[in-house]
Image (cartoon, rainbow, N blue to C red):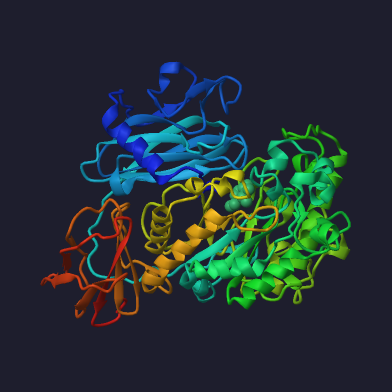
């Protein structure tokens, strides 16, 4: 798997559905045979149609040759494909966004449960790569490149798309119930991924609150405002002081206990707060000499208050920490010989190399502070493992030294004073070495360039495909149109609908994933009312269906995208019926020998559901009444444990 694939979007599910139906029925474009290479060098090379506002060939932004396809916000480009049924294909494409808070999605449509969706939010040209299948009788599909965020003004680009048939694909009808394959504990850079036992609390918890809050919250333009508006570090720091007026990050209503209570009422079991975003403003006390912290500006350690509040409400504690820091020009030019494009006007300068080293050292100092001063931390959401806005999570690992040990020959050495040593070998520790030394149970994602205990899947792109067995995935997205506070957070129509959120959480549960839903509190520290209201609605739904969510595992069978999927716990299988499922009856794959269904009921109101088990041990549920068109969950109780 390539590292740069990041899943995220500001678009809405209906946007995709709308696009796909339009494409399926509305256009008579000629279709592309595979293998296909689309390099956008000639106009007719890609028989694409535009959906939404506009797509055009860009002669200024391209990866190879002299042109790429540019897609305006709220638009998509689509192209029909002729496929061989029962095949495995691979698609690769170079993609790029204007800023890291935009998203480009690559979707494969028209293939029902074989549809796929990947996305990238990276500003440097990034190669996305994904396999997809054509099932029986599926001889056509649609490839779509989308920029679903209608509220942004930014374009996204794609270049050099390549699609190849790489083999056969046979879809097998599942028979019986098999245990999930044992997850391998990967050893990477000297650090072993956590065993299943240490991940269990997260899989049981299922639903958490992500919080993007920092100096940027005062601008109402999301967390990338410093970069997007090219505000120099000097001009940026003033937002921490009242003299700036309206855009002052006052934090005067910061009450993390209220956040934690809200999270709990929303049915969430863990939280994750941005302790420092790419703007480099630390929401905690730091002893690093160049650090810019809330202790200096507000005489408060926001992280400490937050951690205490989580614990008081019995929620697990997560910290978001980015590696990069826009306060350091060296971030764009770590060697001092090759400054990457940046909005601040920095150009190549040999002094940048030492500046980059200081940035790294600050990170080491702060990670140790976060790991040692706040008690047990349950999760880190790393971000920003790349350098100079280029590449993916793992591309900066040589610089950051993300694994167990530091390399004595590294060109950006951490001064001995800021080093931490391994108790056994006495060797200086790398980033994950420090993390695991102080927090042996912690769960981290891969964005510091280390493999990760769990994977991150970012954005609103629909979740598709089978139950995730190799790795556990945390899907994250924002309830609003941006991660950090944006003024339209106050508009209830710009907040994701209850049905959308229910569907996303369900799509996670049936694939053994967890769902981290973000809110962006305002400059005072208040979570905008429309977001609060929606979360409370979610909590009310979870009060009714919680038994089918918490403590379950995805399976025992794979879902059918958009239609249904399964989760199980003890002797109960929970059948999730999603919005595209229109039937009144459903026959499940067969049970194991000796397993019998004893009872079936709608989880939300406990009304009984008719069921019938045939000789082949297949249960048919019938007379299904979809009072909840978004997600209806039916519990099927067996005479013995599901995994027996
Ligand atoms: C991206 C963005 C960042 C955001 C994060 C959340 O990496 O750069 O702004 O915090 O996604 O997952």
Residue at 39 percent of width and 25 percent of height? 48
Front residue of 552 and 529: 529
Q: Decide which of 395, 598 is in the foreground and name it.
A: 598
Vertical comparison of 57 with 369: above or below? above
Looking at the image, which residue is at 27% across and 74% down? 606
Q: Residue furthest bottom?
A: 640
Identity of the residue drawn at 62% across and 68% down: 258
Above or below — where is 418 with respect to 309?
above
Q: Is residue 458 left or right of residue 584?
A: right
Rendering coords of residue 418 (x, y %): 84, 63
Looking at the image, how many numbered discs can be counted on the residues? 0
Please identify the quarter of the rendering in which residue 511 is found: bottom left
Query: In this orientation, does residue 565 appear?
Result: yes
**Residue 172 vs residue 271, the one in the foreground:** 271
x%, y% of residue 18? Answer: 35, 38
User: Which quadrant of the figure contains the C terminus?
Assistant: bottom left
Query: Visible in this render: residue 388?
Result: no
Q: Where does residue 361 sit, x and y in percent of width and height?
A: 81, 56
Q: Residue furthest left?
A: 615
Q: x%, y% of residue 238?
A: 83, 46
Question: Is residue 637 toward the left or the right of residue 619 in the image?
Answer: right
Q: Is residue 168 above or below residue 22?
A: below
């Amino acid at each position: 798997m390539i590292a740069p694939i990041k899943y995220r979007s500001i678009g809405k599910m209906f946007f995709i559905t709308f696009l796909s139906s339009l494409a399926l029925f509305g256009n008579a474009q000629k279709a592309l045979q595979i293998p296909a290479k689309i390099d956008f060098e000639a106009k007719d090379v890609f028989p694409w149609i535009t959906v939404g506002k506009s797509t055009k060939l860009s002669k200024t932004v391209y990866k190879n040759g002299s042109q790429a396809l540019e897609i305006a916000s709220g638009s998509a480009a689509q192209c029909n494909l002729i496929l061989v049924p029962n095949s495995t294909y691979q698609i690769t494409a170079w993609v790029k966004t204007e800023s890291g808070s935009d998203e480009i999605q690559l979707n494969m449509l028209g293939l029902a449960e074989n549809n796929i969706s990947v996305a990238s939010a990276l500003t440097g040209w990034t190669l996305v790569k994904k396999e997809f299948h054509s099932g029986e009788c599926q001889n056509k599909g649609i490839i779509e490149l989308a920029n679903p965020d209608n509220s942004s003004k930014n374009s996204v680009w794609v270049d050099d798309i390549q699609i190849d048939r790489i083999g056969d694909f046979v879809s097998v009808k599942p028979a019986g119930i098999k245990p999930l394959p044992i997850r391998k504990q990967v050893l990477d850079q000297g650090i072993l991924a956590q065993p299943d036992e240490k991940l269990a609390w997260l899989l049981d918890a299922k639903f958490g609150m992500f919080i993007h809050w920092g100096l940027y919250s005062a601008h109402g333009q999301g967390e990338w405002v410093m970069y997007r508006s090219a505000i120099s570090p000097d001009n940026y720091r003033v937002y921490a002081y009242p003299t700036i007026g309206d855009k002052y990050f006052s934090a005067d209503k910061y009450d993390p206990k209220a956040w934690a209570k809200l999270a709990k009422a929303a049915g969430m079991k863990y939280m994750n707060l941005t302790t420092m975003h790419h703007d480099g403003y630390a929401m905690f006390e730091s002893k690093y000499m160049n650090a810019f912290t809330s202790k200096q500006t507000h005489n408060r350690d926001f992280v400490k208050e937050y951690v205490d509040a989580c614990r008081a409400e019995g929620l697990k504690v997560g910290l978001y920490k980015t590696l990069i820091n826009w306060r350091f020009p060296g971030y764009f030019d770590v060697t001092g010989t090759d400054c990457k494009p940046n909005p601040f006007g920095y150009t190549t300068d040999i002094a940048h190399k030492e500046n980059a080293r200081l940035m790294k050292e600050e990170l080491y100092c702060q990670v140790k502070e976060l790991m040692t001063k706040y008690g047990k931390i349950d999760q880190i959401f790393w971000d920003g493992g790349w350098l100079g806005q280029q590449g993916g999570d793992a591309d900066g690992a040589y610089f950051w030294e993300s694994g167990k040990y530091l390399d004595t020959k590294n060109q950006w050495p951490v001064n001995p004073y800021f080093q931490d040593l391994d108790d056994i070998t006495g060797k200086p520790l790398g980033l994950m070495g420090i993390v695991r030394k102080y927090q042996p149970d912690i769960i981290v994602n891969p964005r510091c360039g280390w493999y990760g205990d769990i994977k991150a899947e970012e954005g609103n792109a629909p979740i598709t495909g089978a139950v995730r067995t190799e790795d556990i995935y945390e899907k994250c997205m924002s309830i609003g149109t941006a991660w950090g506070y944006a003024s339209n957070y106050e508009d209830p129509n710009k907040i994701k609908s209850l049905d959308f959120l229910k569907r996303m959480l369900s799509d996670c549960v049936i694939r053994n994933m967890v769902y981290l839903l973000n809110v962006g509190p305002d400059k005072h520290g208040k979570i905008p009312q429309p977001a609060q209201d929606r979360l409370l609605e979610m909590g009310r739904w979870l009060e009714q269906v919680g038994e089918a969510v918490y403590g379950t595992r995805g399976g025992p069978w794979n879902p059918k995208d958009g239609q249904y999927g399964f989760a199980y716990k003890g002797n109960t299988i929970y059948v999730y019926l999603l919005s595209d499922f229109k039937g009144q009856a459903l026959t499940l794959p067969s049970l194991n020998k000796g397993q019998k269904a004893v009872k079936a009921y709608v989880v939300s109101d406990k009304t009984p559901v008719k069921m019938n088990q045939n000789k082949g041990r297949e249960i048919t549920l019938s007379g299904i009444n979809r009072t909840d068109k978004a997600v209806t969950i039916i519990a099927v109780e067996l005479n013995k444990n599901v995994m027996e």
